[in-house]
Image: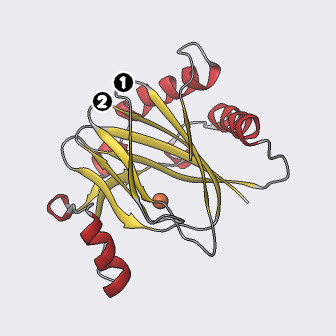
Amino acid sequence: MITFELPKDHPLVACLDDMLIWLLASEVPNRIVGQADKCDLSEEKLNDRIENNSANYCRFARFESDDGYNFDDIQKYSIEQYVEKTGRKDFSMIPVAKTLYPPKEGYLGWHIDQVGGRIYAAYAEGKSFFRYRDPETKEIITSWDKPGEWNFRIFDFDEKNPMWHCVGAEDMRISIGYRFV
Ligand SMILES: [Fe+2]
């Protein structure tokens, strides 16, 4: 996984900051669903998910361009970063999760996603993280966000070696991602 930050005056950061202002004034924070009391992001829970196919839980709201915001510039600059950091050029791009986690109780339990490369931008106001199990070593790794700035991550979901992952946030967290196949 590649992690990086961009300067505050970078066009992608400027676009994301603008989106954040819109998002917090929109209806999206009123649409949060899920079960706050079911957050379990432990390795034990992951093993239980894999071995017993146990239930998974989350608490967040999704948002999309249907919500009245134009994500074209964020998309354009995100693709630029993906190309710059990976060198890949031969791909189709599919927008994926745009997610708002509420303060105190937002999370997304252990799961795997469709194959392909990803770039994610995440902004959090308090302690928050992206946690994953390294597909090769099986080690659980917690990638902490830096609060108050946009945190960028690039990684791949492999078909043969699925990467289990989850998200935890003590305060509000926003993430926006793109998929490359
Ligand atoms: Fe995911």
Residue type, numbered disc 1: Gly
| Residue 175 picture location, percent across and down | 45, 43
> As drawn, which residue projects farthest toward the top?
9
Q: How is the image coloured?
A: secondary structure
Residue type, numbered disc 2: Glu
Between 39 and 18, the one lying in front of the other is: 39
Relative vertical location of residue 152 with respect to residue 56 in this rendering, above or below: above
Label 1 neighbourhood size at 10 Å, few (<14), some (14-19), many (20+)?
few
Residue at label 1?
Answer: 148
| Residue 177 picture location, percent across and down | 56, 47
| Residue 146 picture location, percent across and down | 38, 29
> As drawn, which residue projects farthest toward the front?
137
Between 111 and 67, the one lying in front of the other is: 111
- The residue lying at 26 percent from left, 44 percent from top is 102
| Residue 144 picture location, percent across and down | 37, 39
> As drawn, which residue projects farthest toward the left?
37
Q: In which quarter of the image is residue 179?
A: bottom right
**Closer to the N terminus: mark 2 or mark 1?**
2
Relative vertical location of residue 77 with respect to residue 82 in this rendering, above or below: above
- The residue lying at 14 percent from left, 61 percent from top is 37
- The residue lying at 32 percent from left, 53 percent from top is 60
What is the secondary structure assignment of the residue under circle 2? loop
| Image quarter of the C terminus | bottom right
Label 2 neighbourhood size at 10 Å, few (<14), some (14-19), many (20+)?
some
> As drawn, which residue projects farthest toward the right?
90
What is the secondary structure assignment of the residue under circle 1? loop
Q: Which mark is on residue 125?
A: 2
Q: Is residue 105 toward the left or the right of residue 62 in the image?
A: left
